[in-house]
Image: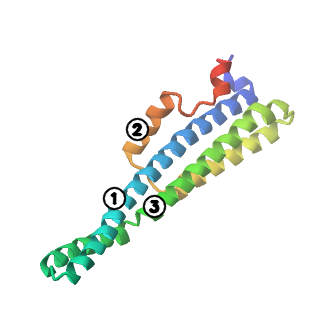
Amino acid sequence: MNNLLDPKLVIQTELKRIEEDCIHSGKSHFNASDRWTTYHYWLGVPSVVLSALAGTAFLRDYGNIAGIMSVIVGILTSLMTFLKPSERASIHKGSGGQYLALRNDARVFREIRLTCVCDEQAAIDGMDEFTKRRNELNQASPQFSKKDFLRARDGIDKGEATHRVDKEGS
């Protein structure tokens, strides 16, 4: 059957593309969030520990050691201020959540509403709304790394993003 002859089938196909884009983008953003959270801890925890040790070393008259530790603390806190890993992690997590919400909304529309919608224009309007939301998310979301995407794709290919009910239905 040629998809061009059945408008609902064409819309259904496009909604599946949106869902696929969203699951890949969502998981990639969650991977980026995890990565930036790790950076936050790798910079923050040593900074706190070294700061406390430098204070102790200073009080015990180990000025050279305290000075070296203080310089390292300064570098680590400068990196935290410049890179803002906690903020980046939060932004990526929010983007990931928005992509997954869009994916879920598109799936529900495709599987439930589209089958009940008799009006072809309402189906087109619904699809247009999902396309607009995806485009807005693509423009507003920060860039994730290629490594974040590859990890997401590998996880999706392994079935990490598939619902149990979808596995049982196959």
**Discs 2/1, front:** 1
**Quadrant of residue 166 within the rendered picture:** top right
Work out whether mark 2 precedes mark 1 in sequence or the reverse, and give the earlier one.
1
- Is 134 placed above or below 57 here? above
Q: Residue at the location (80% across, 36% down)?
A: 113
Return the residue at label 2.
150
Marks 2 & 1, CB-CB < 8 Å contact: no
Circle 1 SS class: helix
Amino acid at pointer 3? Arg
Percent across and percent down for residue 29 are: 49, 49
Viewer-proximal residue among 115 and 5: 115
Circle 2 SS class: helix
Instruction: Answer left or right for 80 relative to 90.
Output: left
Instruction: Answer left or right for 31 relative to 76.
Output: right
Percent across and percent down for residue 40 are: 39, 61
Amino acid at pointer 2? Leu
Percent across and percent down for residue 165 are: 68, 26
Q: Residue at the location (69% across, 16% down)?
A: 1
Instruction: Answer left or right for 19 relative to 36.
Output: right
Marks 3 & 1, CB-CB < 8 Å contact: no
Return the residue at label 3.
88
Viewer-proximal residue among 4 and 66: 66
Work out whether mark 3 precedes mark 2 in sequence or the reverse, and give the earlier one.
3
Name the quadrant of the C terminus: top right
